[in-house]
Amino acid sequence: MRRFLLWLILLAWPAGAEVPEQVEIGGLKVRLQVFAWRDFMPQIGGEGSGSPLMLTPSLVDEGGQPLPGVTFKEIVATCEGKEWRAVPDSGGTARGGPRWPTGASVMVQAHYSYKGKDGWLRLARPAGIGRTE
């Protein structure tokens, strides 16, 4: 049932447009790669429940090499039927997300801009939420 709901969400957003898993830019086929994690490092005054979710997207070529100079205007993450939208900071990481459990799968779509081309890409398969300790 959850996969069916995730599938419906992905079909419905962005409205009326299909979001591809890869695009060709300047002769290169590129895809979206995302690192998703929560930080459980001990902090002075922290309650020990870990940081909110952080996501770092990148466009990578067929060899998995990230393309320099890519910017992301918005990220939409979906996990367990819930959605989080964020704008990455100047370093390229979206911070302050929900406290979804580590190990859970998150599906991500991102609006990229690279060398005069922009659009939406989605992950080919969900990414796992990692944990730093």
Image (cartoon, rainbow, N blue to C red):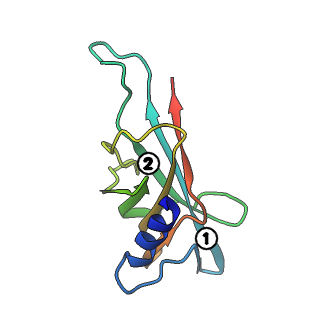
Q: Position of residue 49 (x, y in %)?
A: 36, 24
Which one is in front, 39 or 9? 9
Rendered view: 110 above or below 100: below
Q: Which residue is mark 2?
A: 55
Which residue reaches farthest top?
A: 44
Residue 30: give its label. Answer: 1
- The answer to whether any part of residue 48 appears in the image is yes
Q: Along the horizontal axis of the image, is 79 left or right of 22?
A: left
Mark 1 or mark 2, which is nearer the start of the sequence? 1
Residue located at (60% from left, 80% from top)? 26
Q: Position of residue 11 (x, y in %)?
A: 44, 77
Rendered view: 53 above or below 7: above
Type of amino acid under label 1: Val
Which residue reaches farthest bottom?
A: 16
Mark 2 touches mark 1? (CB < 8 Å): no
**Rendered image quadrant of residue 100:** top left
Which one is in front, 87 or 8? 8
Residue located at (65% from left, 65% from top)? 61
Q: Position of residue 81 (x, y in %)?
A: 39, 57
Q: Along the horizontal axis of the image, is 74 left or right of 35?
A: left
- Label 2 and label 1: CA atoms lie apart by 19 Å
Rendered view: 93 above or below 17: above
Badge 2 density bin: few <14, some 14–19, many ≥20, Cα 10 Å: many
Which one is in front, 73 or 81? 81
**Rendered image quadrant of residue 98:** top left
- The answer to whether any part of residue 118 appears in the image is no
Type of amino acid under label 2: Leu
